[in-house]
Amino acid sequence: MIKKEVAIGFLIGIAANLAGMFLYISLVMQKEFETVLNKASEEGLLGSIIALGAILNFLPFFVFIRKKQDYRARGVLIATILSAIVILITKFL
């Protein structure tokens, strides 16, 4: 039961991060998602886009905290930490 709640939170955190990336690319940059990701990867800016997308994780995290769904909030936090690790790896490679 607990593992299922953490997994649900993790999946929601990953989805929120991807949604944040998509919203940033489509609304702010007004370009195609795949084109921007390819170019950002070539120029070493992929970590910055992932970090901007991770900002959207605040919303489900605080919603879960407010509803006292601590294990789901923990899953969102794990997804955010995973995003930070990916950003760290992209910065050094």
Image (tube, grey):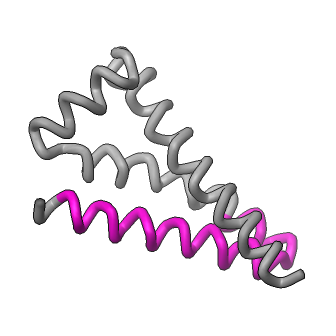
Identified at 24% across, 67% down, the residue is 88
Percent of width and height locating residue 37: 30, 32
Identified at 18% across, 44% down, the residue is 45
Q: Is residue 66 above or below residue 28?
A: below
Dominant secondary structure of the residues highlighted in magenta in the image: helix
Identified at 78% across, 80% down, the residue is 3
Quarter-wise, where is residue 44 in the image? top left
Q: Which residues are magenta?
A: 61-90
Q: Is residue 24 left or right of residue 79?
A: left
Percent of width and height locating residue 83: 41, 63
Quarter-wise, where is residue 1 in the image? bottom right
Q: Is residue 73 shown in magenta?
A: yes
Quarter-wise, where is residue 10 in the image? bottom right
Q: Is residue 46 left or right of residue 91?
A: right
Percent of width and height locating residue 22: 48, 32
Q: Is residue 14 above or below residue 73?
A: above
